[in-house]
Amino acid sequence: MARLPRLEWPGQMHYVILRGHGALTSPGVFTDAADRLVFLAALREAAAAEALRVHAYALLHDEAQLLVTPNAPGALGRLVQTVGRRYVSAYNRRHGRRGSLWAGRFHSAVIEGGALALATLRLVDGASTEPGASSAGHRIGAALETWLSDPPEVWALGNTPFEREAAYRTLLAQGVRPEEAVALRRAALGGWVLGSAAFVASAERITARPAAPRPRGRPRNST
């Protein structure tokens, strides 16, 4: 079966997963704060060049997770390609190695705004408790990262920065429901859209490709 074209919907939020090569269980894709700073520098530059909004990041031992909104067709693919290439080059120089860090293509899901977008934001921010490994500090007042873009769902949490930080800190502590986290990751790894039936239908109409997996097996006989 032919691979579907990547689903990219400019103006909508995308949950992105860039997985490390399986052979990199040690030392990992991100070994320390220095590695993460290099990746984030490349991400900031590429996002500015593409006029792409970065809402959240998590730089884990074996993968990178991003929550972004591209504003032009192809911007997401170009961003990931640029960041991935620059980071691999710097990582290999620093650690004296060769070859790719990434396990093939990146994965992404289009996420509907509202409660689901806020859940995805918390999923990414809460993916690591290590300082600097995620963008959580930006939204709870621990670290200001002016290049990050807070989505409308964050602004709706309060009228002042203090109110928004307090509200988000509570939400982050509550975490994301396990079934919701599974659905989000499954959608990203499958390259699907996650949201209401109307949102999925709109995605299929606009992108001209399936936005959700089709039921398996033959269709039922209605007679």
Image: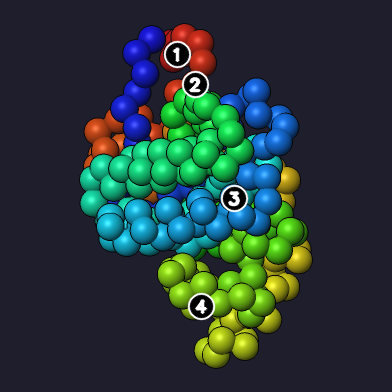
Q: Are marks 1 and 2 in contact (CB under 8 Å)?
A: yes
Identify the residue position indicated by label 4 in the image.
Answer: 156
Amino acid type at image mark 4: Ala
The type of residue carrying mark 3 is Asp
**Mark 2, residue position:** 215
- Tag 1: residue type? Pro
Residue type marked 2: Pro
Q: How is the image coloured?
A: rainbow
In the depicted structure, whether residue 21 falls above or below residue 111? above
The residue carrying pointer 3 sits among few (fewer than 14), some (14 to 19) or many (20 or more) residues within 10 Å by Cα, namely: some
Residue drawn 51% across the image and 72% down it: 145
Percent from the top left, x then y, of residue 92? 53, 36
Label 4 environment density (alpha carbons within 10 Å; few <14, some 14–19, many ≥20): few
* Residue matched to label 1: 219
Q: Position of residue 202 (x, y in %)?
A: 31, 45
What SS does tag 3 mark? helix
Of tags 1 and 3, which is closer to the observer? Answer: 3
* Relative to 76, 179 lies left or right: right
- Position of 180 relative to 134 (above/below): above
Q: CA distance from mark 2 to mark 3?
A: 42 Å
